[in-house]
Image: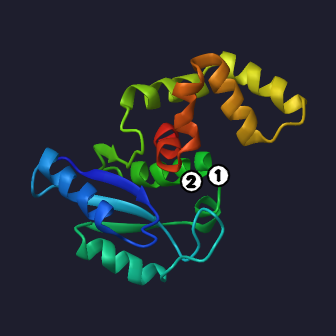
Amino acid sequence: MKAVGIVAEYNPFHSGHRYQIRKIREIFGAETPVAAVMSGDFVQRGEAASYDKFTRAEAAVRGGVSLVIELPLPWSLSSAESFARGGVGLLGAAGVIDALSFGSESGDPAALAAAAACLDSEAYRAGLSRFLDEGMPFAACRQAVVAALLGSERAKVLSRPNDNLGVEY
C-alpha cells in the first residue's frame, strides 16, 4: 500500500484540501494513508494562523488526513525553498511516504518540472549571481533568470504560491 504526503498550512482547512485528499484516495486506493506536514501556530507569511494548530490538525484529520506532523517554526516562517525542504524532509524522515501530493494553480506538470530543472542548473546559478550583484531582491532575480532561460510564460509558475511550492518540492 502506498502512503502519500502533503505539506500544507491548512489555514484554514477547506473544501480544496478535502478534494485533494479524496483525489489521492481515488488514484491510490480508498485505504491509502495520507500524512500531512502542517505549519504550527504561525504560517509562512509570518502571521499567526487563523486557528491554532490543534484545531487545524483536527480539521485535517476529520477531512481525511491519517497523520499530522508539525513543521517546526524555522521552516514554517521561511521562504518557499526552506518551507518545502523542511516539509519534504520530515515526510522523508518518516520513511513510509511513497508519493507527494500538492496543489497547483497552473496544473501544468511540464512547466513545473522545467522550472525545477532550471533552478537546479549551472546556467541559473550563474544568472542569479549576476542579478544579485546588481542589487536586485532575490525573488526578482530568481524570476528574471528563469524567464531569461525558459521564457516568461514558463517562468510564471514561480509567481503563483502553490506552483512555486510545487517547483520546490
| Lateral position of residue 44 relative to residue 4, left or right | right
Residue at the (15%, 46%) spot, across then down: 28
Q: Which residue is mark 2?
A: 83
SS for tag 1? Answer: loop
Q: Is residue 7 left or right of residue 129?
A: left
Q: Is residue 130 left or right of residue 147?
A: right
The outermost residue toward the left is 30
| Percent position of residue 41, x then y | 55, 77
- Which residue sits at x=59%, y=25%? 152
Asked whether residue 120 is in view, the answer is no
Image vertical order of residue 79 relative to residue 70, above or below:
above
* Side of 74 where 98 appears, left or right: left
Instruction: Establish if 97 lies above or below 19.
Output: above
Q: Tag on residue 79?
A: 1
Out of 22 and 1, give the one closest to the viewer.
22
How is colour applied across the structure in the image?
rainbow
The residue furthest right is 134
Q: Position of residue 12 (x, y in %)?
A: 42, 73
Q: Nearest the camera: 42 or 74?
A: 42
Crowdedness near tag 2: few (<14), some (14–19) or many (≥20) residues, C-alpha within 10 Å: many
Q: Tell me which amino acid carries mark 1.
A: Ser
Mark 1 and mark 2 residues within 8 Å of each other at the beta carbon: yes
For badge 2, the amino acid type reads Phe
Q: Residue at x 56, y 53 (%)?
A: 83
Q: Looking at the rendering, which quadrant does residue 139 occupy?
A: top right
- The secondary element bearing badge 2 is classed as helix
Number of on-image labels:
2
